[in-house]
Amino acid sequence: MTGLELPLALFLMLNLIAALFRVARGPTAADRMLAALLFGTTGVGMLLLLAYAGGHPSLVDVALVLALLAAIAGAAFAGRAWTKESDDA
Amino acid sequence: MNLALVFDLLLALMLLWSAWRALAAPNATRAVVMFIVFGLFLTLAWGRLDAPDIALAEAAIGAGLTGALLLDAVRTLGESAGADAGGARSPWRWPVLAFSPLLAVILVVAVLEAPQQLVDLPAVVERNMGLSGVTHPVTAVLLNFRGYDTLLEVAVLLAALFGLLALAQGAASAATRESFLLHTLARLATPPMIVVAGYLLWAGAHQPGGAFQAAAVLAAAAVLLHLAGLLPAWVAPGRLLRLGLAGGLLVFLAVAILPLAHAPLLTYPPAWAGALILLVETALTVSLGLVLAGLFLFLSGRSLRDEETR
Amino acid sequence: MPDSAREFFSAVFLVIGAFFYLAGTVGLLRFPDVYTRLHALTKADNLGLGFLVLGLAVQAESLAAALKLLLIWPLTLAASATVGYLIARRARALGISPWLRPEDR
């Protein structure tokens, strides 16, 4: 354990918050779908760091599951043909 | 001020923020996206609270499957779903806004002032782990010491699926535009997902994991296959599917009833406990995987029964 | 490999990973349209994750744990590539036009 894990987890949290600003702001619906990509990378990274920062080692399994399911949510979001009105999100 | 505290404070803040954005979203799709975001932060929160089992369940079911299900629901019901059910303009929001912080304060005070536990549950569980047949305390509690609760929960999930089957109607018309990339991802990712599900099931005996989480991963694989167009939406379940759906509950019931001749319900003979738990968990993984997948696949692209046709 | 060397390499990889995450976030915030932001997110963030995974795998307690960590990266790569493509395709279908440099308009 290098002692860097927790500071980097915090750093990733700040990154995530900044990125969510973009997701919330938009302006288009496609920008909001970027949230799914974010969790697959930043969220997974945070969980991995927390696992090695003194947290339970099983958080690595949680990260694995999150990576898989973020992909599903993202595919569900972006891959479906939607009605026009939902696209004004 | 140490870093862990800063992290936790930011996390708490983001939980509140995403919950607010989910409830105050101008349309249903944005609400669902923020709900998924909330699910992610909740997963992190469970991780920080040293509850990896719940974190696993939250990541798989809360953020992933429920998110996909809600997105599909929004797509089917239209953007105005729920728009007239109160919402951000309701006059009730003032008393609710006043009451909620008060409730939060009461809860915090109650937790801080909670009296000393008379029974030290973790210690009791620890003492009896040898009898449980597994080495992970959460699994021991869920499948052995409080197995009755789990049995009923499985029955509830199955009942929910029945309700869904009763309501869904019409031909499935899921219009996913064909995507070669999604098709390839589904075919590539499904075998690893099945392996991960098997791993979670096996690991549940000695570390966080277990039937629910494994089932959620299996269901996610099914949803992915469906989104890629490789698995058609389910219509009325055939015999094999029905067997699969009910199988977990039936196996669990059988194991529970077995000792009734000479002992109370759900008494596992200690020598067999480990094997019985594994048997039940395996059956549950398959069944719950089908149930969770069914929640998505039976509804995909369909409309709900109207008032007039009831 | 002695522990101190492991820790050193781990730290180096982790910091490089963090840098790429930062690059991804900056790109996400500053790029002018969703297509360019997709580049930032799928490329930089995933590279950040890769270095992160490498850094943690170096200090993993067993080979199995290290392999499990290293398994996460190709999965997220495949997922990000697909979801990124799907988002771009969706954006195109919605009629979102790509940003052009002023001289190209």
Image (tube, helix red, strand yellow):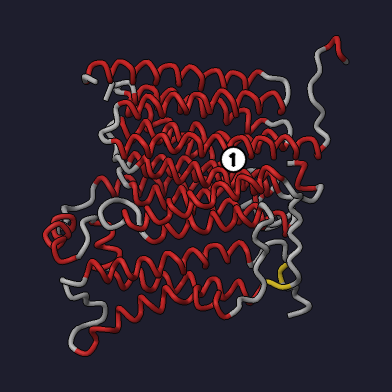
Q: Position of residue B27 (x, y in %)?
A: 70, 46
Q: Position of residue C19 (x, y in %)?
A: 48, 16
As displayed, is residue B35 above or below residue C48? below
Q: Amino acid at mark 1?
A: Arg
Residue at image x 19%, y 84%?
B263
As displayed, is residue B76 above or below residue A25? below
Residue at image x 45%, y 60%?
B215
The chain holding disc 1 is: B
Circle 1 packing at 10 Å, graded few (<14), some (14-19), many (20+), is: many
As displayed, is residue A18 above or below residue B27? above
Looking at the image, the residue that sits furthest to the top is C103
Kindly tell me whether residue B88 is visible in this rendering.
no
* Horizontal side, residue B66 vs residue B305: left or right: left
Camera-nearest residue between B29 and C21 = C21
Kindly tell me whether residue B230 is visible in this rendering.
yes
User: Which residue is disc 1 drawn over?
Assistant: B21
Image quarter (top left, top right, bottom left or bottom right) of the C terminus of chain B: bottom right
Q: Secondary structure at mark 1?
A: helix
Specify the quadrant of the image occupied by residue B105.
top left
* Horizontal side, residue A18 vs residue C39: left or right: left
Residue at image x 24%, y 20%?
C1
As displayed, is residue B201 above or below residue B178? below
Q: Position of residue B84 (x, y in %)?
A: 71, 56
Specify the quadrant of the image occupied by residue B2.
top left
Q: Position of residue B208 (x, y in %)?
A: 31, 51
